[in-house]
Image: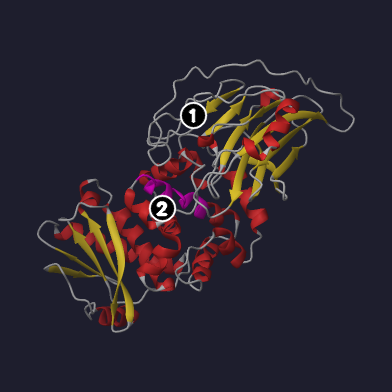
């Protein structure tokens, strides 16, 4: 009875009509195609669209989008892998999805179908296509990629997550023009790892969906992600350090499939301090990572890290003790904190005894696109009842690498770091993914923390 009723309802054509000569009627959607696509391939697209519909309703608890609507198998368009928009019909914003030629020729047409169906479900909550695009196109792509990966795990999702991890200092909030330009498109899709983290640690797929339900009430203005997290009842000052700690070693289900840690810098000795070139400065809710190797720990010692940030905004910091410094490792424990009005975050991880690596993460709380300046200090302090640790300056060293060409979005002349920036005490860790070379090949100038602290706190030392 239910199947007959569903089929009877679907037998009504989409009110915007069909653009291709052939159609297949699925359980939930139409698929239309021409002679460039075989009937068998078109049927596979129908089956995938129906499977995605069922999964998103039954597993993710998303409301079904309005219908009937179509998925177009369009072999004549090679401009993208796919697209999903809305068309107003009889006062209703109906989805219309397309799967384009590159998806078919690369064998990714099923994953693209599931991804575009994710957008159709988003519009079922937000309404018109333009609302989602204006408010948070980056979260559109990250959420749809997360949803499709849950249905059909594919290497393409791993690749975009690695793109995000290759430049974690880039801002979280990218807009549609940046999506179109292509320079950071993969970074938008790679925010799927943030959705995966929410799913795994903050209530499952229902919480991801709730961010959309909250977002649908905000209009077309850009949505600050802190507001969305607070809007669904989660304290952002707890959430963001927790996310930074776990993503430092990709401690989510996808982590074991990722080939490398987020791009980061390694401390070579303690104590130390650094004021890095501005290409290291994180943009709004971007994250800069450091690793403190376990070999720098000592018995009866605590690790103390101070982030000396641009005091015009709040900073979040985290120290994560990790099972191992490899993707997919477990975060055994972490500490997080925020800055006060002075832009300083101080973090202490007790018991840095040489048994585990520690990942350091820092992030400015802002929706702004510009990078924010910071300096960082790290040292050992005696644990309660312990003895004083050695406070000698580290010897300068070199990474032994040539500066790479940087992304044109941040460095148009390819020069990369400051010509006057010296190498020493810190080396590059985690080879950036292709097209994500900002953190490769540069050392940081480390010196005694007492000498650098006063300079780091001076506002004039920051470069905007």
Which quadrant: the N terminus? Answer: bottom left
Residue at the spot 57% in from the left edge and 53% down from the top edge:
366
Q: Looking at the picture, does residue 400 appear above or below residue 309? A: above
- Label the magenta part by its dominant secondary structure: helix
x%, y% of residue 80?
26, 52
Q: Which residue is mark 2?
A: 149
Q: Are marks 1 and 2 in contact (CB under 8 Å)?
A: no
Picture quarter containing residue 356? top right
Lateral position of residue 102 relative to residue 306, left or right: left
Give residue 451's quadrant in the image.
Answer: top right
What's drawn in magenta, residue-wise?
183-196
Q: Please tell me how crowded label 2 is: few (under 14), some (14-19), or many (20+) other residues with Cα within 10 Å.
A: many
Residue at x 38%, y 57% (from the top left corner): 176
Numbered mark located on residue 281 in the image: none
Instruction: Indicate the position of residue 217 as horizontal and vertical percent values.
Output: 50, 74
> On the picture, is 349 further left or further right than 185?
right
Q: Which residue, as the protein is rendered here, is positioned at the far front?
A: 460
On whether residue 189 falls in the magenta region, the answer is yes
Label 2 element class:
helix
Foreground residue among 82 and 236: 236
Tell me residue 312's x, y (percent).
64, 50
Say which of marks 1 and 2 sits in front. Answer: 1
Residue 139 lies in quadrant: bottom left
Q: Quick one: SS at disc 1?
A: loop
Q: Would residue 235 be found to the left or right of residue 43 on screen? A: right
Name the residue at 28% across, 76% down. Answer: 68
Work out how far the residue at label 1 is from the one at label 2, CA to CA, in angstroms: 37 Å
Q: Is residue 43 above or below residue 271?
A: below
| Residue 232 in view, yes or no | no
Q: Which residue has dot 1 on it?
A: 417
């Amino acid at each position: 009875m239910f199947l007959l009723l569903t089929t009877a309802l679907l037998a009504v054509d989409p009110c915007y009509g069909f653009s291709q000569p052939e159609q297949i009627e699925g359980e939930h959607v139409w698929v239309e195609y021409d002679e460039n696509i075989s009937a068998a391939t078109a049927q596979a697209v129908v089956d995938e669209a129906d499977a995605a519909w069922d999964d998103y309703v039954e597993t993710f608890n998303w409301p079904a989008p309005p219908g009937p609507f179509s998925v177009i198998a369009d072999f004549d368009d090679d401009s993208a892998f796919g697209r999903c928009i809305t068309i107003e019909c009889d006062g209703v914003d109906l989805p219309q999805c397309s799967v384009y030629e590159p998806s078919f020729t690369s064998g990714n047409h099923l994953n693209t179908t599931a991804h575009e169906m994710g957008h159709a479900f988003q519009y079922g909550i937000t309404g018109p296509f333009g609302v989602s695009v204006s408010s948070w196109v980056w979260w559109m792509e990250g959420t749809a990629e997360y949803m499709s990966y849950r249905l059909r795990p594919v290497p393409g999702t791993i690749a975009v997550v690695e793109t995000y991890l290759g430049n974690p200092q880039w801002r979280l909030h990218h807009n549609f023009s940046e999506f179109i330009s292509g320079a950071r498109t993969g970074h938008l899709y790679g925010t799927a790892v943030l959705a995966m983290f929410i799913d795994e640690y903050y209530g499952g797929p229902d919480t991801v969906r709730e961010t959309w339900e909250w977002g649908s009430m905000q209009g077309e203005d850009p949505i600050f992600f802190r507001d969305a997290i607070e809007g669904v009842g989660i304290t952002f000052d707890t959430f963001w350090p927790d996310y930074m700690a776990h993503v430092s070693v990709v401690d989510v289900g996808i982590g074991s499939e990722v080939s490398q840690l987020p791009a980061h810098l390694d401390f070579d000795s303690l104590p130390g301090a650094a004021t890095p070139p501005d290409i290291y400065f994180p943009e709004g809710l971007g994250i800069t990572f450091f690793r403190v190797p376990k070999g720098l720990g000592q018995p009866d010692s605590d690790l103390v890290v101070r982030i000396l940030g641009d005091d015009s905004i709040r900073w979040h910091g985290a120290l994560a003790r990790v099972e191992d410094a490899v993707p997919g490792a477990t975060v055994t424990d972490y500490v997080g904190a925020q800055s006060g009005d002075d832009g300083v975050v101080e973090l202490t991880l007790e018991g840095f005894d040489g048994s585990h690596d520690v990942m350091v993460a820092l992030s400015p709380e802002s929706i702004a696109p510009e990078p924010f300046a910071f300096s960082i200090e790290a040292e050992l302090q005696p644990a309660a009842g312990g003895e004083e640790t050695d406070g000698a300056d580290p010897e300068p060293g070199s990474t032994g690498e040539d500066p790479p060409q940087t992304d044109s979005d941040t460095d148009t002349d390819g020069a990369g770091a400051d010509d006057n920036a010296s190498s020493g005490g810190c080396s590059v860790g985690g080879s950036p993914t292709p097209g994500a070379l900002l953190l490769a090949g540069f050392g940081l100038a480390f010196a005694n923390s007492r000498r650098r602290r006063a300079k780091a706190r001076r506002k004039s030392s920051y470069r905007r």
